[in-house]
Amino acid sequence: MMEPSGDLALAAEFPTPDRERWRELVDGVLRKSGAPFESLVSTTYDGITINPLYTAEDVFPPSGFPGVAPFVRGGKPDGAVDGGWLVRQLHAHPDPAVAKHAVMGDLLNGVGSLWLKVGSAGIPATALDDVLADVHLDLAPVVVDGGAEFADAGRAMLEVFDERPLLPGEVRGNLGADPIGVLARSGGEADFAALLDLVTRSRRLFPELRSVVVDGLPFHQAGGSDAQELGASLAAGVAYLRALTDAGLTVAEAAGQLEFRYAASADQFLTIAKFRAARRLWSRVTEVAGATTPQLQHAVTSTAMMTRRDPWVNMLRTAIACFGAGLGGADAVTVLPFDAAIGLPDDFARRIARNTQSVLLEESRLAGVIDPAGGSWYVERLTDELARAAWTWFQEIERAGGVVAGLRSGFVADRLAATWAAREANLADRTDALTGVSEFPNLAEKPVERAPAPADPTGGLPVVRYAQAYESLRDRSDAHLAAHGARPTVFLATLGPVAAHTARASFAANLFQAGGIETPNAGPTRTVEDVVAAFRGSGARIACLCGSEKSYGELAAPVAEALRAAGAERILLAGKESDAGIDEFVFTGCAALDVLDHTFAALEVV
């Protein structure tokens, strides 16, 4: 029997690897597929290069210690080990009775903080006292979001606090003053006077209550990049610091009034890096201003990534986003229900949203380790590069006169629009995949129906969702089905045995079904007559050839000719190997949305 060893030198018998040897091995594998090494390298929308390998040679600044400036590793020395981050649920139902029931259901089942939309886009301000009647406000911090009505919403929340038997130091949360957010969302006036009034009132009554939200979501929801969201929010935070210190607060007091809200996306590493970078950036701002104050962060799962089609996949997206935000050190996290893009969530959707966090906290114990991603060469390098990109954008905004001037002039909107255009191009050719929408769509899915949510203000920055173009096509397909009893159809002329056409047929089926187009296929075929017979039986007017290079060489031209003779009005080919009688090519990297638009036009789908 072997004696246990106290020193396990597991790699002692292996040579020490180096980057050059790794590169040789990778190149050897890639040569077999004909792919260049550059295929392993990607670039973010901020121009940050993501390499396939990171080592100790990738230099980055020291990230320090938790609870110590620059707070990259967290704003508190003990992180969230005690009880985890705050599980904060959003409520916006305009019926006070429904909202009250939903609030209590959440608080009794794992939620520790409330985020309430108040006013015309949510709960009536006059109903706040009733909605919160059974809530222990000293245990569950409340964050109010009144939009353009933030002054009325904030004062109503102050009245609720004031009427309860609470000690001044027991009241926590945020009154939600955010005039820059109002400007960004609606183009309305940035009312700093109302902000200062709320801050004055709350400081006099409840010293631990914050009054100002620095909301990065409008910049994210307009299609902006992570650095653009960070840089714009930093500029907004600086604008609020200036306003508050001009009103007589110290830098530390002013910073203590702010809470930053950021989007968490399904890109877990960028999300982790974003929250770490945000703390570093704000630490630098407060240091220059004469204080050392950690940033309080509220993470919200991205609305831009949410889909209306196959919304069940949103559960996976939000779980990954919550994971990234938690590992990134967010102080509070809101997981939006999977049906949030459709309308007002139901009880089941809210239950899944809160239980997503409960699983990560209670079963996975993600908060049991402080900054678990810290020390990763990849995460540390990404954090540094993201912070630098955000700082550069922040400086550009400041040179343009600040975020308010930048929003009014269109400077900020133009830059966000450029990023959205680049993202749209990647969505159009499916470089950026949307599972259940642009990849692996389910045309037989039963639609999820919800009561419409109160309309958010418009008139400022646009609000986009990544799936919107594909979902618009799916809507047109549904309308065609309702009017004609069948969906638009493209016949897949599969050439040869299954092994010869499976890959390209799957590719083409995914592409067409992403627009709501049915794709019957010929199955295994031996002859041109087999394909033509299956085409006639499908009732389709358009055919797409799918096969191997060998089958294209032997069958593409005669099959295309025979299909035209059989009534095919348009012939497509999955690949670029043949041009015999082909109207359009469908290949990896093609603009799928263009192909779908052309197909809809050919089929006269309105």
Image (cartoon, rainbow, N blue to C red):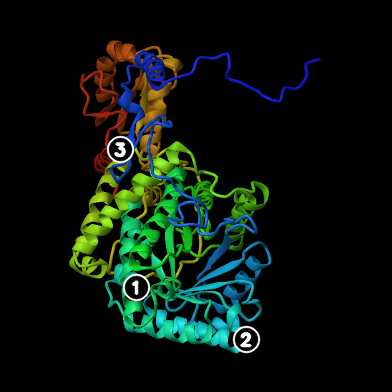
**x and y, in percent, of residue 409 in the image:** 18, 67
State which mark lies toward you, 1 or 2. Answer: 1
State which mark lies toward you, 2 or 3. Answer: 2
**x and y, in percent, of residue 360 in the image:** 61, 50
Look at the numbered disc 1 and give the secondary structure of its residue. Answer: helix
Look at the numbered disc 3 and give the secondary structure of its residue. Answer: loop
Of the numbered discs in the image, which one, if any, rests on residue 594? none
Query: Which residue carries the number 2 mark?
Result: 164
Residue at (45% x, 62% y) in the render:
295
Please, is residue 39 above or below residue 81 in the view? above
Sequence order check: which comes first, mark 1 or mark 2? Answer: 2
Disc 1 from disc 2: Cα separation? 30 Å
**x and y, in percent, of residue 15 in the image:** 50, 14
**x and y, in percent, of residue 145 in the image:** 45, 73
Sequence order check: which comes first, mark 3 or mark 1? Answer: 1
Pointer 2 and pointer 3: residues touching (CB < 8 Å)?
no
Of the numbered discs in the image, which one, if any, rests on residue 429? 3
Sequence order check: which comes first, mark 2 or mark 3? Answer: 2
Residue type at mark 2: give it. Arg
- Residue 526 sits in quarter: top left
Report the front residue among 583 and 334: 334
Please, is residue 61 above or below residue 461 in the view? above
Residue type at mark 3: give it. Asp
Report the front residue among 309 and 484: 309
Residue at (61% x, 57% y) in the render:
84
Of the numbered discs in the image, which one, if any, rests on residue 240? 1
